[in-house]
């Protein structure tokens, strides 16, 4: 549909762009546009804005949208879409390649600190299939094909269905690309290892940290090819692409500040008590039970060459870990359409991804393997006598790092496709159009792990492959853990190879029609009411399969059994959306619009639910001022893992034992409620790696989360080419799916005597710990943290943006700001207990996992003239106070003291420039010009990798270049 050009409609079209906050875009092809003014449109096509299904030239959006342009990906050296998108203030700082142990294994996008499961990711307005963990992976989206990226604030479940709670990120691809584009890119990191504090810290522990210029490391190479064009007298169009990217590994040992793992509660190089040579925890054993030593007794023993003496070695496991994971990926795809006539246009869209990614962590070992051994067993030598054991048998817990076998390596091969085929066109000779499509997507991951010990082999090999209690296994060789004279072949025989297969499928059939009713409100100057109606059927499945040892929890370093899931779900939706232009005129008050949306969902696993939206927008001041507001009811259905994953003991992330260590912050009486006897208080062992066990898994009784989202704001052009916007948002989620929380359960127990029955300490060695022993042992210490619909989230803040461009000298200068200010970051882990609520705004706090800067912003300045362009970008992350969530200062008696004074504000400067030579454009740039190191966190629940807080630039300067050839 086309409408004739007039002043009002041109102004409204401009305001639509403003309302979409395209002014937040920091990139423009300035070198090519420096001497040109924007072309004047002669006609306007009806368009669809992210967050609505109604095509319109005039209707103004009520939801704020931040737009990222295609040029920005080149200007800032982003070879993958997440590299740039996750830097934007509305999106959480999360960078997959810099997550190692505990990573998703693929990129994610999360808004408002609510997790990637509450942000809906789309390509051209349609969903991507979920990857492993049922989290959407945007890696399939080629940066070379981006036309723009829309970041929609607020819920959008009425438009797109469940899961659009925090917001929507929509990747809009350039389906009308013409010509050939060939691009080659190269990037690397560089850091000056000259931090005296870290150098001394390593030296004091006997480690030699790297020093001086690192040179180029973590190198990445990329190549992109895009070919597109029209055919059949412009009735058809097709575009195809292929991209390749490969980056090298970068290790903790290559930076002085990550060369050693620092204790989260004390500023010294720490490490793991599973060390080399072996450590033995010895107790007497008689009458089928352990006889613990009196509290305060040091029952840790190491071999000294002739016998055993008290001692503990710590193993520096950091250097061998990946800091940047190596990653190889190829994407390919095509889009095509053919307009037979106005009523019939078939189209197809296909995306493919092949990727290999690796995780490497420190060597496996005997992670607290308990055995009962006769004191006259010649293999243990004089251990019983040296430890003062008076019984015939001893309980010995084995701690030994497998330095002979090398690091644990997990290699994942991912294959993903998404194919959409459909028909669209006009309905009869009316303003109505239709779109019917079928989408099919599938992901498959093959994960192979190597060099991890099998628990069932450790005791057998340690006792010489002939002990009557622990037996032997095929290929067993004696593992002389006792005197540290280990045959590497024996270590290799104890290791196994793990296999895991993850499969997801996604199919969606959708049919919709939208158009105008033929009538409108009297004051609308002839504009009609727009309507979109339709239905969608979504079917998805999740399947996992593991080798028998993984399923039995037999791998020493896995932290838990990996149990299979085979589940599916179907959802049928029916939706309607209306665009209501109430008033259209010239003058000071130009326009008033309303938007309404409703969706009814029939969910096979979660039952029926309704979502809806209401939006209002008004134009003022000759269409120079847009005021908007919106309300959305959104939902998130529980994932198949949320519902059906088998419950089991596993390593917890983001929790600690609040009663461990010599000086707990809670009293002996309070810790007694968690199961610590008074005479053991102060002697409960801490895990040097800060890893503890919890019971986790699915809950088939879960219901969908319910969210109410609100936005109010404005966009204005006070003078020519100066665009400003400010939007307030609020997201309220009730019935949020999650556990009470590892630390919260302990706090409720000790402070209110609640949920103490969820804490299960292991008394067998007299230590009453929450982490010693294998996860496969149901008697190992743990906390029950199963999920339920019990949480409350409240997020609110301000999104702001500004853009100003003007002619300057021979070229044009463009400046822009896009930012976010947090007003509230509130979590209540248990809705029935107000005491479990806490505010994270402006705080960094290990106990509550707070890491919320009050403000983040990106400011850009770019100048283009003739064939040249230069750009400067300033990324700002506000400082955070290190306080308790009640606002009180921490004292020296508190466990966590590593962030005394908090985290200062971070200011990153990025430079880039480009020059064109005929058909070629060369781009060079440096991000983090000043080589700022990330803020220190210690080995805590907040460290995404190494000793650093996640989200900050991790490894120094990022230097990049590319050459692009366009024909």
Image (tube, rainbow, N blue to C red):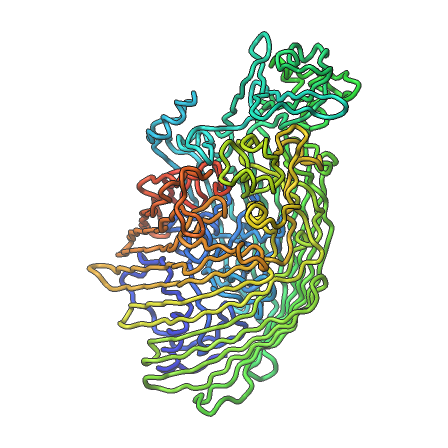
Question: On the image, which quarter does residue 700 sit in?
Answer: bottom right
Q: Quadrant of the C terminus?
A: bottom left
Q: Residue furthest bottom?
A: 522
Towards the viewer: 649 or 292: 292
Relative to 582, residue 480 above or below: above
Q: Position of residue 686 (x, y in %)?
A: 55, 33
Q: Position of residue 595 (x, y in %)?
A: 51, 78
Q: Position of residue 851 (x, y in %)?
A: 44, 49
**Left-right relation of 572 to 681:** right
Q: Residue furthest top?
A: 306
Answer yes or no: is residue 178 visible: no
Q: Residue furthest right?
A: 468
Residue at 56 percent of width and 76 percent of height: 577
Towards the viewer: 313 or 572: 313
Residue at 67 percent of width and 58 percent of height: 702
Residue at 41 percent of width and 43 percent of height: 890
Residue at 53 percent of width and 68 percent of height: 708
Answer yes or no: is residue 706 visible: yes
Question: On the image, which quarter does residue 371 sit in?
Answer: top right
Q: Position of residue 523 (x, y in %)?
A: 44, 90
Towards the viewer: 779 or 701: 779
């Amino acid at each position: 549909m086309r409408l004739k050009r007039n002043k009002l409609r041109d102004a409204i079209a401009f305001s639509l762009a403003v309302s979409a906050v395209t002014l937040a875009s920091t990139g423009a092809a300035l070198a090519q546009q420096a001497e040109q003014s924007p072309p004047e449109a002669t006609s306007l096509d009806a368009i669809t804005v992210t967050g609505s299904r109604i095509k319109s030239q005039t209707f103004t959006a009520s939801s704020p949208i931040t737009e990222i342009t295609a040029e920005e990906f080149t200007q800032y050296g982003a070879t993958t879409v997440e590299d740039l998108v996750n830097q934007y203030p509305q999106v959480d700082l999360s960078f997959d390649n810099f997550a190692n142990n505990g990573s998703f294994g693929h990129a994610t996008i999360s808004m408002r600190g609510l997790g990637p499961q509450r942000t809906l990711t789309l390509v051209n307005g349609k969903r991507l299939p979920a990857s492993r963990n049922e989290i959407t992976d945007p890696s399939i989206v080629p940066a070379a094909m981006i036309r723009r990226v829309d970041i929609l604030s607020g819920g959008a479940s009425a438009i797109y269905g469940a899961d659009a709670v925090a917001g929507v990120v929509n990747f809009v691809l350039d389906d009308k690309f013409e010509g050939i584009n060939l691009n080659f890119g190269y990037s690397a990191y560089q850091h000056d290892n000259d931090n005296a504090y870290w150098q001394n810290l390593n030296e004091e522990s006997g480690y030699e940290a790297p020093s001086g210029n690192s040179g180029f490391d973590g190198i990445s190479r990329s190549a992109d090819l895009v070919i597109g064009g029209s055919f059949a007298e412009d009735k058809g169009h097709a575009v195809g692409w292929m991209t390749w990217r490969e980056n090298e590994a970068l290790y903790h040992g290559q930076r002085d500040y990550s060369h050693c793992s620092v204790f989260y509660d004390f500023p010294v190089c720490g490490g793991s008590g599973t060390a080399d040579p072996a450590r033995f925890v010895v107790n007497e054993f008689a009458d089928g039970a352990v006889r613990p030593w009196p509290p305060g007794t040091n029952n840790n023993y190491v071999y000294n060459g002739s016998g055993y003496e008290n001692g503990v070695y710590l193993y520096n496991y950091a250097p061998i870990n990946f800091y940047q994971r190596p990653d190889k990926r190829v994407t390919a795809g095509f889009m095509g359409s053919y307009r037979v006539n106005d009523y019939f246009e078939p189209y197809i869209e296909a995306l493919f991804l092949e990727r290999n990614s690796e995780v490497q962590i420190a060597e496996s070992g005997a992670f607290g393997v308990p055995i009962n051994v006769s004191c006259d067993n010649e293999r243990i030598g004089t251990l019983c006598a040296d430890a003062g054991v008076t019984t015939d048998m001893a309980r010995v817990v084995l701690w030994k790092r497998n330095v002979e076998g090398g690091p644990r390596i997990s290699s994942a091969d991912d294959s993903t496709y998404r194919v959409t085929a459909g028909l669209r066109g006009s309905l009869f000779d009316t303003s109505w159009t239709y779109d019917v499509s079928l989408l099919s997507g599938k992901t498959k991951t093959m994960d192979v792990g190597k060099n991890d010990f099998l628990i069932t082999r450790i005791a057998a090999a340690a006792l010489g492959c002939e002990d009557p209690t622990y037996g032997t296994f095929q290929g067993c060789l004696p593992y002389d853990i006792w005197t540290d004279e280990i045959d590497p072949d024996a270590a290799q025989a104890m290791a196994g190879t793990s296999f895991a297969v993850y499969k997801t499928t996604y199919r969606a059939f959708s049919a919709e029609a939208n158009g105008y009713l033929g009538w409108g409100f009297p004051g609308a100057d002839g504009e009609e009411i727009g309507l979109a109606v339709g239905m969608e059927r979504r079917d998805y499945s999740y399947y996992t399969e593991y080798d028998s040892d993984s399923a039995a929890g037999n791998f020493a370093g896995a932290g838990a059994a990996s149990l299979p899931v085979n589940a599916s779900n179907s959802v049928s939706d029916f939706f309607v959306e209306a665009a209501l232009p109430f008033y259209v005129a010239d003058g000071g008050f130009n326009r008033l619009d309303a938007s309404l949306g409703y969706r009814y969902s029939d969910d096979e696993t979660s039952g029926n639910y309704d979502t809806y939206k209401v939006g209002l927008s008004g134009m003022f001041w000759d269409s120079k001022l847009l005021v908007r507001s919106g309300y959305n009811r959104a939902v998130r259905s529980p994932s198949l893992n949320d519902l059906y994953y088998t419950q089991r003991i596993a390593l917890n992330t983001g929790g600690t034992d609040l009663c461990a260590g010599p000086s707990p912050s809670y009293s002996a009486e309070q810790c007694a409620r968690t199961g610590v006897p008074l005479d053991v208080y102060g002697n409960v062992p801490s895990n040097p790696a800060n890893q503890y066990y919890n019971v986790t898994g699915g809950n088939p009784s879960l219901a969908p989360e319910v969210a109410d989202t609100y936005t109010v704001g404005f966009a204005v052009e006070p003078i020519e080419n100066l665009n400003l916007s400010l939007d307030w948002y609020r997201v309220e989620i009730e019935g949020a799916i999650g556990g009470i929380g590892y630390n919260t359960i302990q706090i409720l127990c000790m402070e209110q005597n609640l949920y103490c029955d969820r804490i299960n300490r292991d008394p067998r060695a007299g230590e009453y710990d929450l982490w010693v022993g294998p996860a496969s042992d149901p008697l190992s210490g743990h906390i029950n943290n199963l999920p339920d619909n019990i949480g409350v989230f409240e997020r609110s803040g301000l999104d702001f943006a500004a853009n100003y461009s003007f002619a300057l000298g021979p070229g044009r200068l463009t400046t822009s700001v896009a930012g976010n200010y947090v007003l509230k970051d509130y979590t209540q882990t248990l809705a029935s207990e107000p005491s479990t609520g806490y505010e994270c705004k402006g705080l960094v706090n290990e106990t509550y996992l707070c890491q919320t800067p009050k403000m983040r912003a990106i400011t850009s300045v770019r100048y283009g003239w003739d064939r040249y362009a230069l750009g400067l970008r300033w990324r700002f992350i506000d400082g955070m106070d290190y306080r308790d969530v009640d606002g009180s200062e921490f004292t020296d008696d508190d466990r966590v003291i590593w962030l005394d004074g908090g985290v200062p504000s971070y200011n990153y400067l990025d430079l880039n420039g480009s020059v064109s030579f005929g058909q070629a454009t060369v781009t060079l740039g440096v991000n983090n010009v000043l080589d700022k190191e990330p803020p220190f966190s210690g080995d805590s629940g907040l460290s995404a990798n190494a000793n650093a807080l996640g989200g900050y630039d991790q490894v120094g300067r990022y230097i990049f270049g590319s050459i692009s050839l366009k024909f």
